[in-house]
Amino acid sequence: MTQLILYNVFNGLIIGAFYALMALGLSLILNLSGVINFAHGGFLAVGGYLAFTLEPYIGFWGGLLLSPFLTAAIGLIIERLLIRRLYGRDPLYSLLLTFGLAFMFEDGTRFIWGPATLPFTVPDWLSSPLSGQFFFLTGYRLFMVLLVTATVIALFVILSRTRVGMRIRAGTLDLETVSVLGVNVRILRNINFGLGIYLAGLAGVLAAGMLGLQPTIGSDLIMPSFVAIIIGGLGSLPGTLLGGLLIGVASGVTSVFFPSASEAVIYVMMGLVLLVRPRGLLGEEGRF
Amino acid sequence: MVRLDKPAEESAQSEAPALPVPGFRIDKRAADAIVWLLLLTMPFWLNWIGGYTQLGTRVVILALAAMSLNFLLGYTGVLSFGHAAYFGLGGYGVGLTLKYLVPNTLVGMGVGIVAAIVAAAIIGALIVRLRGIYFAMVTIAFGQVFYFIAYRWNNVTGGDDGLSGWHRLPINLGFTQIDILHNKLAFYYVVLFCFAVSVGIMALLLRSPFGRTLLAIRENERRARFLGIPVDRHIWLSWLISCTFCSLAGTLYALLNNFSDPHDLHWEQSGNFVIMAVLGGMRSFWGPLIGAGIFIVLEDYISSRTENWESFIGLFFVLVVLFFPRGVLGVIRRRTTQ
Amino acid sequence: MSLLQVENVSKRFGDLVAVDGVSMTVETGELRAVIGPNGAGKTTFFNLISGFLTPSSGRIIFDGEDVTKLLPAWRVWRGIARTFQITEVFPELTTRENLRIAVEVASGYRLKTWLSRDADGEVRARVTDLLDMGGLADKADRLVGEMSHGDQRATEIMMALALKPRLLLLDEPTAGMGDQETYDITQLIRKLHRDQNQTIVLIEHDMRVVFHLADRIMVLAEGAMLAEGTPNEIAKDDAVQAAYLGKAA
């Protein structure tokens, strides 16, 4: 029993790390541009499928390295051509546009790669269990946790130490002042969008290694990411991270005792948070 | 608050005698008459131009859902992206009742609507303090709860396959019986009756002082608050009214298909309602009806031609947002007033 | 008893003290002006009275009742109405509709005006009165968002007045207006004050307007009260001259 719970807590943490990685990208875009990117799950799927296609040529590591950048490039183009036109308009329109894009991504991946689940192979030495007793602790899962941790640390370092990162954070707080100070907000939003999509692409490659690839992989993961952002508090990246991990663990633990509620539990959590603290756990007052 | 980039005229006002176009009021009455005439005769001309009666029934039902959503979106200025939850709750309510509890169509509809009202009242109380993009996001997320319940509660709801094995039953009014099961035409008119009653109530509400306070909130929440309007309470009421009529549409939709579909609870369906309202023109009363008509006919056509119809629907969303954000009626009205 | 007693209120935003222990007493029928250089805390002071913000310390008594912690809508029901520095109206509705909403809300409204023709007639008559009083009769059916700044401001004042307030708060009623518009609005305020004995507190930058209208003037500087008195006293006050009028003139 202990082992079962431990397994599920660990599993929940891994899933939570996913949610967090995806939700952080969503949160970045939402905070600076005011756009709820419904197509984020679609970008995640693209990241996974690109790595799958590239693997025969450049291997797992090449795919892991290159695919998120390619996904981000697609993201930059889409931001430049479509989403940029909707800044400053009612959020309704960007929501509908990315909603349409989500349809196109999902159907497009199905068209190109087929509806069946595709296996994405990870190197042998990564996929074997680390110990007999904790059979679930494969090298790949441990590697994932480490990589997500490193990525999150890198993200926070970028945001607090580099010039672009500091501008993104400042723009999140007060876009008008930032633009008055001579920062090109359009370029800033473009870079920020790319950064968010990079995280989605990376999450896609990692998810592919664990779950395999299917066209609905993105739309299955997007809703928990929304919940993670709401629980953590809009406008707060640490909050989003916390929210992602919390709902991951919560649904992991619930699946031990009451498996059929493992999805619904995160929405119950969200309801409770909204009841007690409408701005979310780490959200600032009066921002939304 | 929802705001178009450029203001459109308001249509649902009781007193708009001197709008820029002379005789606008008469035009509006004529438009109302034409809409009702077309709806009343739809089963006859629809078959003639290549449609079929159930398609017309579907248009009317989904138009009711989109118009309910627009009560909130277009007339209160609150963006809900989770109305499928209440649509689907209505559908499952009627399906479960007919299958397991009472073999009576009207009772089933009542159960579905009450279930949706209870859910909307509770969720509404949680979200009513939120605004704009935050409100939209929370409604999307909350919408999924019911989807997962339907999806997971396999032995009762049929899970992913949906709830089948039941069908609508003739409505017994005591003095006469309406055979909505076999007579497609009878069912169409029952649906149209529900539509007319709902739409009539919504129009009356919008013309009332209550409706004007909703417009006030849409136009300028701060001003509304400092006029002494309890804004949160009004938004909650508007949300509840909107969800109630949407759930009625949901019960009718399940009855039409003799099937409760988990997809009706999914956020994709919520998005469809929003695009119908936007496509037709969310600042006009009949806009969502026109949007629903275009959307459903298009979907019906594309899905019969290609397997990749989802891509085309997605592209359609993108095109509407980029080139047609004011909707059909928004564009027409702008032309006539300038 | 005084209509409004503000007792030693302060408002802090983090380290910044926007309003610092200000007191003010306004009698029924008085027209009080609040003046001061930019950043003196005038608008924050107003926001505390109208309930847009709650004070960090101090009390606000309206007609003998402590309203310090009440929400805006509740203060409106007790008789405090306000306008904003940046005009707040319903831009996509006509002037008549703007006023009608305010009248309906003020009449306890809801279903009665909808169901009864008499009640509806009363509302319409009141709207017409307000349109006439504000000089807006010929613009009744234009969209407010398309009207001039001055007419929008007049609409906003008439909306506040539709609530039959016992205290009317006007935040810079002539801000951003030309000479003619300033004159019209000043005449309107004067008329309300003289003819209807309306109690008014206003913030104003334009000294001509202030000295023309006010019974008493309060001067704020850096969040604190610098002086208070009749227009004559204020004009002669050395501290005010030094801190404010000297620079402005």
Image (cartoon, grey):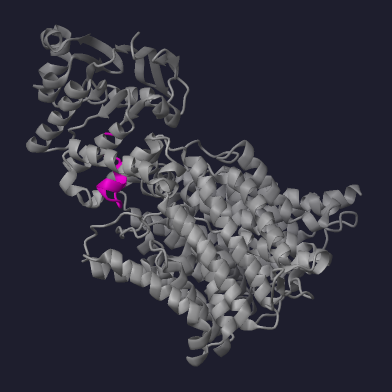
Task: Please check the rendered image and state whether residue C112 is part of the magenta-colored stretch, yes or no.
Answer: no
| Up/down of C111 relative to B90, above or below | above
The residue located at (25%, 34%) in the rendering is C157
Kindly tell me whether residue A211 is visible in this rendering.
yes
| Up/down of B175 relative to A175, above or below | below
The residue located at (25%, 52%) in the rendering is C143
Q: Could you say which is closer to the camera, residue A110 or residue C7?
A: C7
| Up/down of C136 relative to A108, above or below | above
Q: Is B75 left or right of A273, judged from the image as shown?
A: left
The residue located at (61%, 63%) in the rendering is B248
Q: Main secondary structure of the magenta part?
A: loop
- Give the residue at the far front of this rendering: B175
Kindly tell me whether residue C83 is visible in this rendering.
no
Q: Quadrant of residue B159?
A: bottom right
The residue located at (56%, 87%) in the rendering is B52
User: Can you give x and y, in whole percent of width and height, for residue C23 in the image?
Assistant: 33, 11
Q: Quadrant of residue A208?
A: bottom right
Q: Is B184 left or right of A35, judged from the image as shown?
A: right
User: Can you give x and y, in whole percent of width and height, for residue C167 in the image?
Assistant: 31, 23
Q: Is C240 left or right of B219, judged from the image as shown?
A: left
User: Can you give x and y, in whole percent of width and height, for residue A272 in the image?
Assistant: 67, 42
Number of marks present in the image shown: 0
Q: Could you say which is closer to the camera, residue A147 or residue B102?
A: B102
Residue stretch rendered in magenta on the structure: C83-99
Q: Could you say which is closer to the camera, residue B323 or residue B245?
A: B245
